Image (cartoon, grey):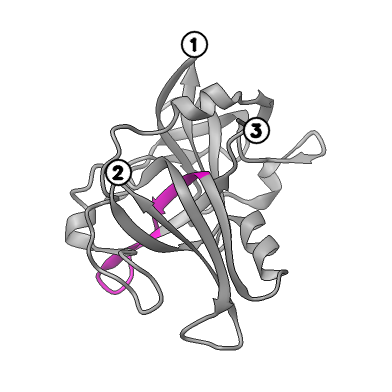
Amino acid sequence: MQAYTKTIICLAKSRRPGGVCVAGREIREGQIGPWIRPVSDNGAVPSSILRMGGRWLQLCDVVEIGLKQPSPHTYQIENHLLDQERPWKRIRRATDDEVRAAIQEPATPLWNGVFSTKGGRRDKVPLVLANKSGGSLRFIAVENLSISSVSDVHDASRRKTRGMFTYAGVSYCLSITDYDVENEYKSRPAGVYAVGRSYLCVSLGEGYGGYAYKLIASVIAPQN
């Protein structure tokens, strides 16, 4: 298959082993299209490719990326194999209207899961259900986000950053993997911080132990 390019609004930039997880929705002729998650052979985007013209990729950047072929994997149907020979090109910042247009409506519970980890709330989905979920990415608007940075329930020497919010009438507490948010809140005193209205990219991460785990891959502050 011949390599191709896609132009996306970057709606997720989060940590993962081996590099960075990036995802966004395609933008074409002013219209918001499907999700695109560029992946390499090990799943991650190398950090080096995210530096464009002396500036690192930021959330809400509109960028042109090179891809080789669609590469769906179980419930992560949005994956496309990255063309690492083609540098990414930053085009501009997305407008707030464009970001709002990427929000998925109507609001429905996130993968209908009722399963929770020890420190979370409704934050995991059995793989058998995840594989039937129709995708692994959601971009949502919430009104009542709070962020906690407290000791990990499994390792008291480490800090864990989680986001708590209500969406479609359901309460969630999910791990945050957004690079900037993690770094900011881990540098603050331990506690719970009210954030309020926010846009969130919620992702189903890699499966482990029979479950897929819901993660907050980005926190974006609305501009107005």
Which residue corresponds to mark 3? 88
Which residue corresponds to mark 2? 135
* Residue 45 image position (x, y, % from top left): 57, 49
**For mark 2, does the 10 Å Cα neighbourhood hold few (<14), some (14 to 19), or many (20 or more) residues?**
some
Q: Nearer the viewer, residue 187 or 14?
A: 187
Instruction: Name which quarter of the figure residue 140 lies in.
Output: top left
Residue 91's tag is none
State the extent of the magenta-drawn residues as a range: 198-214
Residue at screen point 52% across, 87% down: 155
**For mark 1, does the 10 Å Cα neighbourhood hold few (<14), some (14 to 19), or many (20 or more) residues?**
few
State which tag comes first along the sequence, 2 or 1: 1
> Would you say the residues marked 1 and 3 are in contact, meaning their CB atoms lie under 8 Å apart?
no
Q: Nearer the viewer, residue 176 or 36?
A: 176
Label 2 and label 3: CA atoms lie apart by 25 Å
Q: Is residue 121 visible?
A: yes
* Residue 49 image position (x, y, % from top left): 67, 43
Q: Is residue 47 left or right of residue 54?
A: left
Type of residue at label 3? Trp
Q: Please, what secondary structure does the residue beneath circle 1 have?
A: loop
State which tag comes first along the sequence, 2 or 3: 3
Instruction: Name which quarter of the figure residue 60 lies in.
Output: top right
Which residue corresponds to mark 1? 29
**For mark 3, does the 10 Å Cα neighbourhood hold few (<14), some (14 to 19), or many (20 or more) residues?**
many
Type of residue at label 2? Gly
